[in-house]
Image: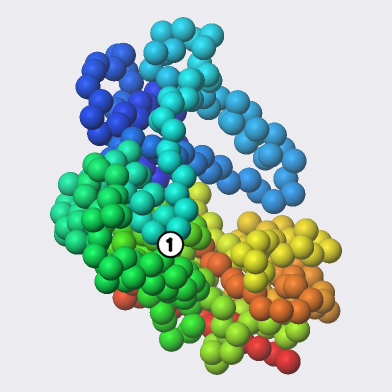
Amino acid sequence: MGTRATGGKGGDHAFVGPDWRGELPPGVIEHRVPDNSVMFAIRIGVLPGDADDLAEVNALQDRFSLTSLSNWSDPAAHGRAGVPDLGARPHYDGDLAFFRTVADLAAENPPAPGNDAAIELLRRGGITLGEPMNVDALSEPMRKGLAQAAIDGPKVMDWKVKYRGTPYPTRWNNLEPGTYGVNYFDRAAGSLQGLFVHDRDEAEYFSTYEDGDGALLDGSQRYVLHFDADQIPPTLPNGFWSITMYGADFQLVKNPIDRYSIGDRTPGLTKNPDGSLDIYIQREEPADHASNWLPSAADGQFRLNYRIYLPEADAKDPATLVKYIPPVRKTS
C-alpha cells in the first residue's frame, strides 16, 4: 500500500494469517499473509531540513493505527492490540543448537506452498517439519557435517552480505528484489542486512564497497561520483533517489554536518552548467562544493548504498539500469 500501489489513499486493511477463517467487517480489505508472524514497516519521505514538511508527516503518522480485529468495533480501542503468546521456545546449547531452533521455527511458521524441495532437504538433514529435531537419531557423520555447516555457514553469509545481488562493471551490485521466492541465498542475506527490501516497481537498491577500479573505498581517500545529464536516474512522480554512507560496522557515519545521505532532495544540491552532477565523497569539506558533499569517515573502509524509489522503466530493467549507476572514481 502506498504512493504507487494505491495512489496514496487511506483505508482499512486487515492482515490475516494463512489459516485464519472468519468474516471481516464491511469495507475492510483482506490481506492474506503467508506466515503466522508478521512485521510491518511504514515509510514516509520527509524533505531534509523542512520543518513544515516534517510537521505534515507527523500529522500523517498520527492518523495511522494498528489494532486487533477483536477491538475493531470499539473506536476507543483502536491503536491497541494484545500480543498473542506464542508459547515458550526452548533454548539449546551445543554444536547443533542452530538446527534445533530451525526445527522449532519451522513448526511455528510452516513453509508456504512451493517449498517442497527445501522441506525435503531439511528432512535429509534431520529436520522433519512440525517436529522437534531428534539429534539422537543422527548418524555420527551427519552430526559432524551439520556441526561444520554451523561454523562455515555464517562465513559464507558474511561474503554474500558483502556482495549481494548482481554485479555490474561499474562495481555496483544490484540487490535482488524483495520477493525472493525460493532464492534462499538472497533471502538469508536480506534477513542479515536489509529487511523490507522492495520489489523493482517500488525501488531499486545498489551497494558497493569499491571504486570503479575495484579498490576498496577508504575514508582516507577522496572520491567523486559523476552523473552525466542523461545518467541522473529518472523517477515517476513522487519518486526520488539517494546515496547513503555506511561505515565498516554497517551503521551511518557520524559527520560534522549531520548529512548521512545525499540525493535529489538534498537542499542546495547543484548541477554543473551542462546538466551533469558531481557528488564529492570524502572526509573534509570540498572547496566550493559543500552542497554536493557526502562526508565519509576519517579513515577505514566504508560502503555506499544507492536507492532509486519509484524508478522509471529504464532505471529498473536489469538490462538497461547500468546507465544510471556510474562508477565511483578516486581523485587523490
Q: In which quarter of the image is the N terminus?
A: top left
Q: Quadrant of the C terminus?
A: bottom right
Residue depicted at x 38% and y 37%: 37
Query: Can residue 221 be seen in this snapshot?
Result: yes
Mark 1 Cα shell of 10 Å, populated few (<14), some (14-19), many (≥20): some
Residue depicted at x 25% and y 25%: 20
Residue 291 lies left or right of residue 212; in this view the side is right
Q: Which residue occupies the foreground of this view, 212 or 105?
A: 105
Q: Which amino acid does label 1 sit on?
A: Asp
Q: Where is residue 147 in the image (x, y as percent from the top left)?
A: 38, 67
Query: Can residue 308 be seen in this snapshot?
Result: no
Q: Position of residue 141 (x, y in %)?
A: 27, 71
Residue depicted at x 43% and y 25%: 84
Q: Position of residue 257 (x, y in %)?
A: 81, 61
Provide the residue designation for mark 1: 95
Q: Position of residue 67 (x, y in %)?
A: 46, 21
Q: Which residue occupies the foreground of this view, 69 or 223?
A: 69
Quadrant position of residue 320 = bottom left
Q: Which residue occupies the foreground of this view, 83 or 30?
A: 83
Q: What element carries label 1?
A: loop
Whether 82 is drawn above or below 86: the answer is: above
